[in-house]
Amino acid sequence: MLSVESINTFYDRSHILHDVSFEAGGDEVVALLGRNGVGKTTTMKSVMGLTPPRSGRITFEGEDITGNRSDDIANRGIGYVPQNRGMFPNLTVHENLRMGLGTAPRQESRFEAVYDRFPRVEERLNQRAGTLSGGEQQMVAMARALVRDPKLVLMDEPTEGLMPALIPEIADITQNIADAGYAIVLVEQNVDLVLDIADRVYLMDNGRIQEHATPDQLRESEEILERYLGVQ
């Protein structure tokens, strides 16, 4: 479904991603793991066209989307849950969800499907997004990405900044989205969450993919987790 081939991405003159390559199939959860600042978020932004790579190739369902506009990429079927949620705090929850549609035609069935998955979001429709709790904002961000019914969802740090008690709930929602048939590329610092729901894991360091393994392989290799994550 998604193929990222040897992309190199820069911020001005700073070379952030170095020949990054990975793949995500249509029926799996693929995770990118690594310490802060190793290029995980830049990878997601490169796929979404927010920081286009200067070289390399990104294909989605066999079509080259390298350097395409973000709205075109979204229209092709890629949803994006950004780091820090990307709320419009002065807009209502419903207005934030409408932003997720972009130029796509409004279909009430899309909203109803999202409300079925996120009943708490439906309860807060007329509330300003900036007044929600962190967990509720994360649910709105996830719902906004799903309102177009994408084929692939990019999730960047969905549990970042949440109270520990809320992390299992967000993990369950992420698992439910995967179980519903959505492909997911997940960036996450919570190693246990990743090992529980991912099918395959890529480990990043210094802007490069350094290792590729299954969760079972990583559970059996403390040395790899310690090397790239400092986890013992």
Image (spheres, grey):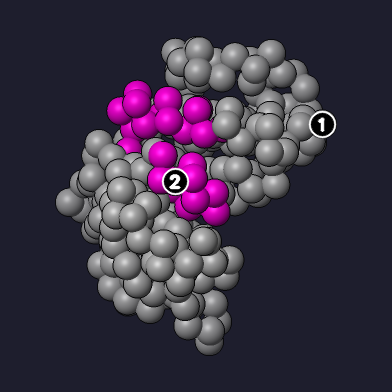
- Horizontal relation, residue 50 to residue 133: left or right: left
Residue sitting farthest toward the right? 131
Mark 1 or mark 2, which has the lower sequence index?
Answer: 1
Residue sitting farthest toward the bottom? 13
Q: Nearer the viewer, residue 88 or 29?
A: 29
Q: Residues within 10 Å of mark 1 (few under 14, many from 20)?
A: few
**Residue at image location 43% in from the left, 30% down from the top:** 175
Q: Position of residue 94 (x, y in %)?
A: 65, 23
Q: Quadrant of residue 37?
A: bottom right
- Horizontal relation, residue 203 to residue 116: left or right: left
Q: Residues within 10 Å of mark 2 (few under 14, many from 20)?
A: many
Give the magenta part as a residue range: 170-196
Task: Residue 184: say if magenta.
Answer: yes
Marking on residue 31: none
**Residue at image location 50% in from the left, 28% down from the top:** 172
The secondary structure type at the circle numbered 2 is: helix
Instruction: Give the residue at mark 1.
Output: 131
Identify the amino acid type marked 1: Thr
The secondary structure type at the circle numbered 1 is: helix
